[in-house]
Image (cartoon, coloured by chain):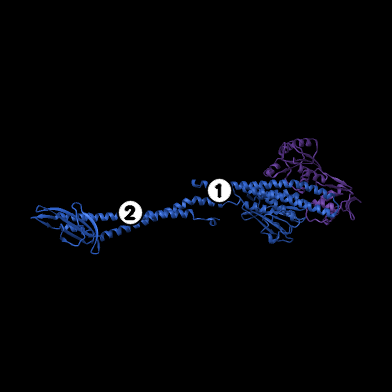
Chain colours: A purple, B blue
Amino acid sequence: MRYLLVEDNDQLARAVSDRLSLDGHVVDRAADLGTADAFVETGDYDLILLDIMLPDGDGRDFLQAHRRAQRPTPVIVLTARSEVSDRVGVLDLGADDYIVKPFDFAELEARCRAVLRRRSGGASNLQRFGDVAFDPLACTLRVGDREVQLRTRELRLFEILIGAPDQVFSKSKLVDRLFSHDADVTENAIEVYIGRLRRHLSGARAQIVTVRGLGYRLSLT
Amino acid sequence: MIAALSGPGSIRRRLIIQLLAGAALLALVVFVIVRGYARDLAAESQDNILAASVTAILDSVSVRDGALQLDIPYSAFSMLGNVSDDRVFYAVSHGPRFITGYEDLPVPVDPRTGAPQFGTAVYDGAEIRVATAARRLSVAGRPEVVAVSVAQTRDGLRQTLTRISRNVAGFGLGFFMLAAALGVFTARSATLPLRDLAVSVSRRGPEDLRPVEAPVPEEMTPLVGALNGFMGRLSAALSRSEDLIAEAAHRVRTPLATVRTQAEITLRRVDKPENREAVREMIRAIDESSRAAGQLLDHAMVSFRSEHLQSAEVGLDRLASDAADRLRPMADLRDIALELCPAAEPGLKVKGDAILLQSALLNLIDNAIKYAPPDSDVIVRVSREGAYGTVAVEDAGKGFPPEALGTLTTRFVRGSNTLGVVGSGLGLTIADEVARAHGGHLVLGNLDREGGGACARLHLPLL
């Protein structure tokens, strides 16, 4: 996914873009509205994260112009506490969601995912591997002509595995990626989700293979 | 509070006592003056009669054939007799020679001619009033002085005085009673604005620091001015500390976000189990601080807004669905299904601040999502209970520890069974404060069903 982050706070911007890059997203960063306009005109973004208070203007003006130009890219507004009563107004101006600063990354990630899913509409973002088609936005996994709806954790686990087929992921790495904001999750919890994915994949050529002592990988059998 | 602070007397009591004392003094003075005046008047009238009697007797003294002749007219005594039952005495002397009457009647030694002289003496065991006058007559070419004294006991006068005193005392008592009643009434009406002010101030909520605007009498303006000034300073101090919390939370959380990202990146690179555990601990600690900062911020916002409560109509179904939509992405993260259960009777509305109410509900739902096991349901249920609308948040978690139900809404208090879940102990405090600011309350309990689960209910008075 390509993200445009419009945020003037250096530290926060770096933290957000680092975190999004971890999940394999591409992030362009604009520190003011002028740069943001230039980015939007040249690049094709999947999601814009927009701060309101910027050195050269109000993020809401950018939002309005964006909607007037009928650009389809969804926008999530980053608001500060003092703008608390403007939150609803931001939605009226055409934002897809808002998040109140300072925020948890888990929340940001979840909101981005929800907005992307909602905005994707019919447009599919299919990833294929062997006889398996995976649509992370629609949360579906298609095996042959059978379609399964994945729950969030299954989806995120499968996203990791299909992102690098044939690569072995250790249980602990998978736990880190999936449950880093959850408290007392043991590595055994992964087995539950691996088990569920295997049931969904039954009959397919793509299978999750246990590599003894090392972890799991997604391979064609 | 008012009873505890009542110090040296009350203004009303002091006012009443002073007014009563004044009225009593006035009544006493009136009594003394009127009685004295009446006594003087009565004594004067006795003196006048005595003088007339003396004059009548003196007038009847004549000189016939070179000798003094005295024929006391009946009227001279009858005019005294009709006043009362007083005894009458008289004495007539010619120079130093006693002629007739009561010889031992105490009379002035040297009576003057002209206007009668008056004196008071004791005679025959009774107080008497004596009038004495003298007349110069020419007897056989020689001037002779004839002196006449008439005396009367004062019993009648005393009786009259007693009667008058009784009447005047009655009048004085009546005057006192009337003045006392007026005094009590005056004191009450004078202190009424003070009491009104006290009532209007004490009826306020603990966080209502608006200036007092009720009209007060001129004399109380400085007091109200001082009160308003004090509340203004208090309010400014409060909002300064809220701003400080907000600023501090913001400043703390941004670098924490950076640290957390770095920690996550590190975690992906570290292989040794003990190092991984350390980094994971670090991430958890960062989350805890970050969340606490966020909730402090939220709490500051709630305190601030409850003070300036905005009133709008808020539909409970809409409130519940908005809050659920907002948190659904968070619920998805843990594979928790967030279900809405609207009221059987649509259109339930409460009056209040939509942002505050939403903040309260978000905290309750957020709690439920955090404490419920993955792959379970959280239900947001809207219903009506009499004059109250209820938004209940039910989960399938371990429930609230029953022994701590009363203390969970206290700041920074967390349940005993929250081990390992990131939290600040402010969420329920926020929900509780919002409910109370709207005249409602927050009820915590556990579900009486198989598997149990916690249930937090926001009760809000319906429109």
Q: Return the disc, 1 or 2, that comes first in the chain's sequence.
A: 2
Q: In this view, does A189 lie above or below B305?
A: below
Residue that numbered label 1 is attached to: B227
| Residue A70 in picture, x, y percent from top left | 75, 37
Name the foreground residue: B12 vs B333.
B12
Residue A75, quarter of picture = top right
Residue B213 visible to an observer of this rendering: no
Q: In this view, does B299 lie above or below B158?
A: above
**Label 1 in the same subunit as label 2:** yes
| Residue B410 in picture, x, y percent from top left | 67, 56
Residue that numbered label 2 is attached to: B33
Name the foreground residue: A6 vs A112.
A6
Name the amino acid type tagged 1: Leu
Residue at mark 1: chain = B
Name the amino acid type tagged 2: Ile
| Residue A77 in picture, x, y percent from top left | 73, 42
